[in-house]
Amino acid sequence: MVLVLGVSAGAAGARAMLTHSDQPHLPPIDRCKVLRRRSGSMEEAVFEAIRLMRKSAAKRDEFITGIAVTTRSSSHAEAVRTTAGRNRLTVIDEPVAQLRYLRFTGRLPTEGSVLLYDLGASGLTLTQIDCRTDAVLASKRSTVLGGDGHDALLRWLLTRGGVTVDLNTTRRSKEALASERVLTVCDPISGQRAVITRSDFADLVEAGIHHSASFVRHMVEETGIHPDGMALLGGCTRNKSIRDELEQQLELPMIYDPEPEFVSTRGAVLLAAERPSARRVRSVRTGPVVTPTESNDGPVSRKKLVAAVAVTATLGGTIVGALAMDRDTGGHGDSKPSVEVVGPPKHG
């Protein structure tokens, strides 16, 4: 039996999922997450994930017949395409894969439009799509809010409590709060302990989530089309406090998968099963990078204002880094790999 491999690429690295071609909806045979090295490229993480999954398939004496990689931007798509070498793969615009999986699971409305709210490590991507035609009505991205900023805020809170930990420990603590209500974090050097709750974390990120809700409203105003649902994607939306705040702020039907960070990867698996031998290259439709406008929903408290300023300040380096990465994702080699680039239809 042959295998298919889905890979989702982002600023923080890549996720990969390996499954049988006739069972893309079932729990995966294997999967991995490869973090991007500090001085490494996004495509390096992608092909390391592919290598690991090929190794896993070889141990089972099975063959990977199709590989699909989702990317967020045209520069990322070109970087993956150029680096592919002999790798036969399909490059897919991320919203296409997300839409494919949501439709497969029956969570997608059959009429009207859906808004994809993708809150990842490096920022928030909003994409509004017509459910009947799959046309992209609008797409925007902001680096003011994201998982990296949440990590920085939580680390700041722990430091105030006398506990200094590294970034990985901070991130693990943040992820644990998605399922745990109370967490104790220990300073490895001093032995000092700090107790943080899910409510503490909710207070930290509340201003940023409030800001993102205004970002959503502004986008809906621009399209003039009220979405019939909003899909919460990306690892940050695992936290129930964030989901509850968004639902309260926007009063939209929420579409949520138990593993929101793997929606793109699972969509890539489905598309890899449908496109096992990609050869054709097509253009990618991407949205502009836009910084969200100020909210018109009234004044915020001093605590919210401080948190909002902290989010913006801590992510300043992230914004510069993301822009620099887009400039630096160049080609490696002159060979033309067998790659198909798939993007959603433009709204016309």
Image (tube, rainbow, N blue to C red):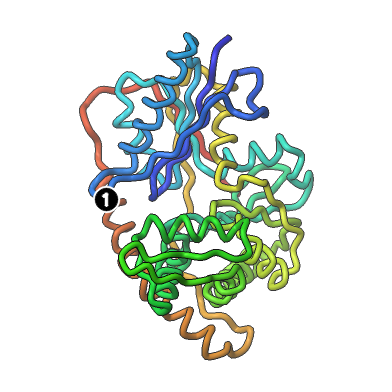
> Where does the image place residue 275, in percent across and percent down from the top left?
54, 21
Outermost residue, left side: 333
Q: Is label 1 in a helix, a strand or a loop?
A: loop
Instruction: Name the residue type under label 1.
Output: Arg
Left or right relative to 125: residue 35: left
Q: Quadrant of residue 304?
A: bottom right
Q: Which residue is mark 1?
A: 38
Left or right, 299 with respect to 226, comes to: left
Q: Left of 136 or right of it: where is 253?
A: right
Residue drawn at x 74%, y 45% as measured from the top left: 108
In this view of the protein, which residue sits in the foreground, 52 or 216? Answer: 52
Which residue is depicted at the point 50% across and 20% down?
66
| 297 is higher (above) or lower (below) than 182 | below
Front-most of 70 and 151?
151
Residue 72 coordinates in the image, percent (x, y): 45, 46
- Where residue 126 appears, as percent x and y from the top left, is 56, 58
Q: Residue furthest front?
A: 191
Q: Is residue 348 visible?
A: no
Pointer 1 local density, CA inside 10 Å: few below 14, some 14–19, many at least 20 = few
**Residue 175 appears in the figure:** yes
Q: Residue at x 60, y 55 (%)?
A: 238
Q: Quadrant of residue 249?
A: bottom right
Q: How many marks?
A: 1
**Quadrant where the N terminus is found in the figure:** top right
